Image (spheres, grey):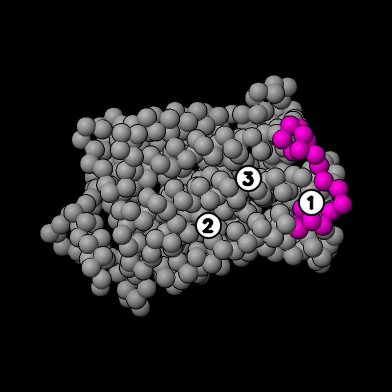
Amino acid sequence: MTARVRSDDAYLRELGYEPVLTRRMGAFGNFAISFSVISVLSGCMTLYGFGLTTGGPAVMMWGWLAVGVMVMSVGAGLAEVTSAYPTSGALYFQAEQLGGRTYGWYTGWLNLLGLLGAIAGIDYGAALFTGAFLNLQFGFEPTEGKTMVIYLVILALHAGLNLFGVRLVSILNSISVWWHLAGVTVIVGALALVPAHHQSPGFVFGEFVNRTGWSSSPYVVLVGLLLAQYTFSGYDASAHLSEETTNAQVSASRGIIRAIGWSWVAGFVLLAGLTFAIQDYAATRGTATGVPPAQIFLDALGPAGAKVLLLVVIVAQLFCGNAETAAASRMVFAFSRDGALPGSGLWRRVHSRTGTPRNAVRLAVGVAALLAVPSLYSPTAYAAITSINVIGITPAYAIPIYLRIKHRNRFAAGPWNLGRWGVPVGCVAVAWVAFVTVLFCLPQAAPVTVESFNYAPVALIAVLSLAWLWWRVAGERTYDVPAHHVGRSTDRFDQEIV
């Protein structure tokens, strides 16, 4: 064990936890997991059709720039708190340390909802793109039922990969970074060089399109920010993997900031490349493939080129889903370690050989499978899944930042900090999160029917109600943060026998 790992483990013990996970991830690997989870080739691509309807090119492009600035403030505030409290529990542990048990409890449940919704959103998006590829290659008809089967296969793949240990996850995430950067370069390059016709800059940066059914343009502009805000989520993965990262107090914080920054640049280039290459706007929106970017590839490059680029996107989405599964499973492990979940004794077990919380991986994937079931019955269910991700995880980002501001006189900053800018940056971050949390509870399409209803607020109410109920039934008695203090027996950390 290196001196750096010993130092990381010693600090973790100071925070109250005995190290049980394996530290095999370096600074680049920690950045890579957040960059992979943000995944512009997943978020931008899967919600591009939503953007074409809800505001069009102007909202997509300018919204991306504006949301990116605000998300960077949230990321900076979160990175500062993470440097002080680098644990797998991340947000809820930070909230508990700064604000007490109640803050920690509800932050954890919101974070868990967001992470599980993210797995569902990412992998279901990958299933949609896989269906589009199979449609072009084999004439496959991507019905809801067939898409669900593809989705379950992808979930099984990610479960299998995550059972092998963090070293494999780290290697795949490192490959993912270069795949994403090269993929954006190849896609934008091909769309810039091959088609004879391109849209004008005035169209790309000024065309407003409203096909939502709402008559208020400002309302549509605000709802259209979902594309960017959904994509810019999941960067807490760096914090959740901090107990498996060396020099965690610095590496995890830098991982958050660098992931947001590089994604901001890559996503803008990708959205611009796609939008300049649109040949027929109406045909792209109503594509038979079910995936508007696939229609852009098809119109601009022909069937062969479209298939190649679709494969580039699908592989990137698979990397993204795998990274998100790792992050969500660590949250399940940490929350169970602190006695917060039903059946915590099962989910906190760590495999003795791989150092991986295998049961936590299985639970995360299983819940994600259930979250996508409504997609069999409602064409708007995918947008609802993405909203669940945003509505769960975004408020969870703001709570520890808010508490750091509230208790700034006793907040002990880590080695990565914002100095005197911590409070003003944190205030901007909290205000932005409050705004988008309200925004994404609003209906996205009119008229509001059973099929078009935005189920995100229902999910939010349901998870908070479940959290309250479980608190009254057992949580008040079993929830203990830190669950394992220095000097206590390590019996609570069950291990699976190989």
Q: Kindly report which numbered mark, 1 or 3, lies closer to the viewer in this rendering.
A: 3
Q: Position of residue 314 (x, y in %)?
A: 66, 61
Q: Amino acid at mark 3?
A: Phe
The residue labelled by disc 3 is 268
Q: Earlier in the sequence, mark 1 or mark 2?
A: 2
Any magenta on residue 467? no
State the extent of the magenta-drawn residues as a range. Answer: 190-207
Marks 2/3: CA–CA distance: 16 Å
Dot 1 amino acid type: Ile
Taking the image as shown, residue 380 lies to the left or right of residue 265, namely: right
**Magenta span contains residue 203:** yes
Which part of the image, by quadrant, shows the C terminus? Answer: bottom left
Q: Position of residue 396 (x, y in %)?
A: 41, 40
Task: Give the alpha-carbon distance from disc 1 to disc 3, as whole Å.
Answer: 17 Å
Secondary structure at numbered mark 2: helix
Marks 2,3: beta carbons within 8 A: no
Whichever of callouts 1 and 3 sits on the residue coming sooner in the sequence is: 3
At 67% from the left edge and 63% from the top edge, which residue is drawn?
312
Taking the spot 15% from the left edge, 62% from the top edge, the residue there is 489
The residue pinned by badge 2 equals 36
Report the disc number at residue 254. none
In-front residue for pair 250/366: 250
Which residue is denoted by mark 1 in the rendering?
A: 296
Looking at the rendered structure, the kind of residue marked 2 is: Ser
Of mark 2 and mark 3, the one earlier in the sequence is 2
Marks 2 and 3: which is nearer the front?
3
Where, quadrant-wise, is the N terminus in this rendering?
bottom left
